[in-house]
Image (cartoon, grey):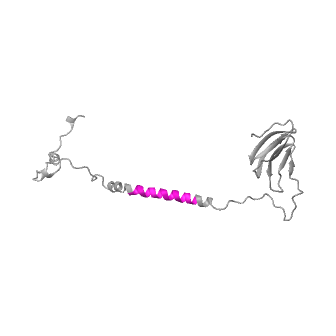
Amino acid sequence: MTRDDLDPPSPDMARAWRPVAAPPASDRDDELMRDPPPGEHHLGRFAGYAAARRIRRILIACLAVLVAGTVFAWYRWARQGEEPAALRQFELPAGTDTSERPRVLAWSQGKARLGLTREPPGVDTIELPDRTLKLKDGSDMAQFKVVVEDGKTTALEPVSGEIVEILQPGATPLLKP
């Protein structure tokens, strides 16, 4: 089908689609600006949103500072206060004489996690087959892992605190200085 095959439009349709004539010229046409200045008239409601940008940023910054200050103050308040008292692992009845209690532990075979303490009635010396372990000066408590196999200490790993090893003849040091 081509254009020529179509029926021509009716004369009523031609009148309805006639081009609109330009409005008549006015005496004030020379008052219109050729190049209007840039403005925000085309933004509509977005102009108000853009105008409030500065105050919105200030409010968000204040809110962020307030939240950070609150978190910091809460953290400081939570950390403030008394340090938890070091609890003794066991309490002896009042009037107990600890001077005659042995404070030496002998370990001869196997794996163990052992501890030393200066406070009585705790252990302050551990004797292994090839070495003796004591607390280092200035340390009140210490824990360590030890493995003893066939009369020889094969592993010694400090967990907390500081210890000193006193070697027997033929033993090699396992603690790093």
Horizontal side, residue 33 vs residue 148: left or right: left
Horizontal side, residue 118 vs residue 13: left or right: right
Q: Quadrant of residue 11?
A: top left
Of all residues shown, which one is farthest toward the right?
100
Vertical comparison of 62 with 134: above or below: below
Region of the chain picked out in magenta, as a range:
55-74
Q: Residue sitting at 82 percent across and 51 percent down?
A: 124
Q: Quadrant of residue 128?
A: top right
Image quadrant containing the N terminus: top left
The secondary structure making up most of the magenta span is helix
Residue 63, magenta (yes or no) = yes
How far from the left and from the top, in percent, is residue 130?
86, 40
Of all residues shown, which one is farthest toward the front?
137
Q: Residue sitting at 77 percent across and 52 percent down?
A: 141
Horizontal side, residue 42 vs residue 107: left or right: left
Of all residues shown, which one is farthest toward the bottom?
94
How far from the left and from the top, in percent, is residue 173?
80, 38
